[in-house]
Image: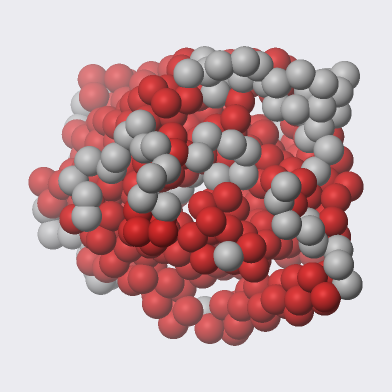
Amino acid sequence: MQTGTGGAPRRELTLLDSTCLIVGIILGVGIFQMAPDVARGVSSRWWLLALWAAGGLLSLFGALGYAELATAYPVEGGDYVYLSRAYGRWAGFLFGWVQLAIVRPGDIAVMAFAFARYALSIHNPWGERGGATVESLYAIAATVVFTAINVAGVRQGKWAQNLLTAAKTAGLVAVVGVALVAPHRSHPLAPFEPIPLGLATIFVLFTFGGWNEMAYVAAEVRNPKRNIVRALVLGTIAVTALYVATNAAFLHTLGHQGLATSKTAAVDAVATAFPHIGQRVIAVLICLSALGAVNGLIFTGARISYAVGKDHRAFAALGRWHQRTGTPARALLLQGAIAVALIAALGTYANTILYTAAAVYAFQLATSLAVFVLRIKEPHTPRPYRATGYPVTTIVFCAACACLIRSAVTYRPWIAAISGAVLLLGLPIYWISSRAGESAPKG
């Protein structure tokens, strides 16, 4: 396949680059924060490991459907392209609008806050007095720095991703190794409050978020008919193996009771062998994990806005590929600016998660249903890969998305209402721009 020239995307991402992108985005900080909560949702260590493996399998089911769509339509934009073809231009526009206004800047802010929280434990120049302010400044700095790196060029962005992914994967493997050889730590049989299995499953799936990012950079993947599927499958399997191994290590050192009652499972596990440096080592590891996710989300997210800008004149300024750097520079800069604004306005990690949850699962459901719609609507489109286990795998994933949406809405209805209002605001924007002739059909 020929590479893009001039102002078009170029196929520069190898299978290694693509797999690192997937692993780097998924391996954020969820495994460290969610492991104790997930342990409270099951009755034994074996059910705990089974639940983590099931979360990986369910994510793989979703990835298989996305792989079919990405290889059938290997262009920039991911869900935006599939939704437009399946339901109409309004659906693609709405997805692009939500990604631009809610989801992607919110995801970047979540990971930037996670980095800032642990960076603060390593170095806080103002002491306890400026904790919240310094945390926000660290988060803003991470967003600005990695936006600048990705604006500078695809090579810079992908090598930053590869190095961060290698560093944090090695760090996580080291934590697993230390925990496995450390002596078992005795814990008093302190009671803990169990949580519903469904809620524990939501926590597991949250930590797997990001496997669908490959679809957004399909136009930059070399040999996309083979490498997109391979990257999605290899990335998801690699993360599942790491998550299961990490929880096995925690169970070996802390036990099920100890894990369920721990506030900082990784710190407690490593501190068993290295009581004096364990906390700092884990803080560095989590910082690397969060930065890898920040860079990956910035890299892929701007490609969605770029795709919207190409098709809708209301956002035409975002649909330009910078000829010198080979990046969607304007989309990157706007995305970074919104993420910085969210960091300043929302102020906490938890608020940013709640701001994005319902919208994320709603569009994953719509995109997965597009696998069915497009097989009927465009039966003659070449499909180099067809989802393994179709239709069962896709139906199971769709059902899971519906359950996650319900949980997000019932848990924090007022935050879901705000996100829903912002989402629906995209409809009159699309209608007005269409009526004004600002959205022209593809040529």
> In this figure, which colouring scheme has been used for the structure?
secondary structure
When asked about the image quadrant of residue 245, the answer is top left
The one nearer the camera, 37 or 380, is 380
Which residue occupies 19% across, 55% down? Answer: 392
The picture places residue 229, in percent across and down from the top left corner, at: 37, 30
Which residue occupies 38% across, 45% down? Answer: 380
Residue 115 visible in rendering: no
When asked about the image quadrant of residue 247, the answer is top left
Which residue occupies 86% across, 67% down? Answer: 437
When asked about the image quadrant of residue 170, the answer is top left
The one nearer the camera, 404 or 139, is 404
The picture places residue 307, in percent across and down from the top left corner, at: 70, 45
Which residue occupies 53% across, 83% down? Answer: 413
The picture places residue 237, in percent across and down from the top left corner, at: 30, 31
In the rendered structure, the answer to whether residue 170 lies left or right of residue 421 reads left
Residue 62 visible in rendering: yes
The one nearer the camera, 22 or 341, is 22
Disc tally is: 0
The picture places residue 158, in percent across and down from the top left corner, at: 63, 20
Q: Quadrant of the N terminus?
A: top right
In the rendered structure, the answer to whether residue 45 lies left or right of residue 379 reads left
User: In the rendered view, would you say 379 is above or below 303?
Assistant: below
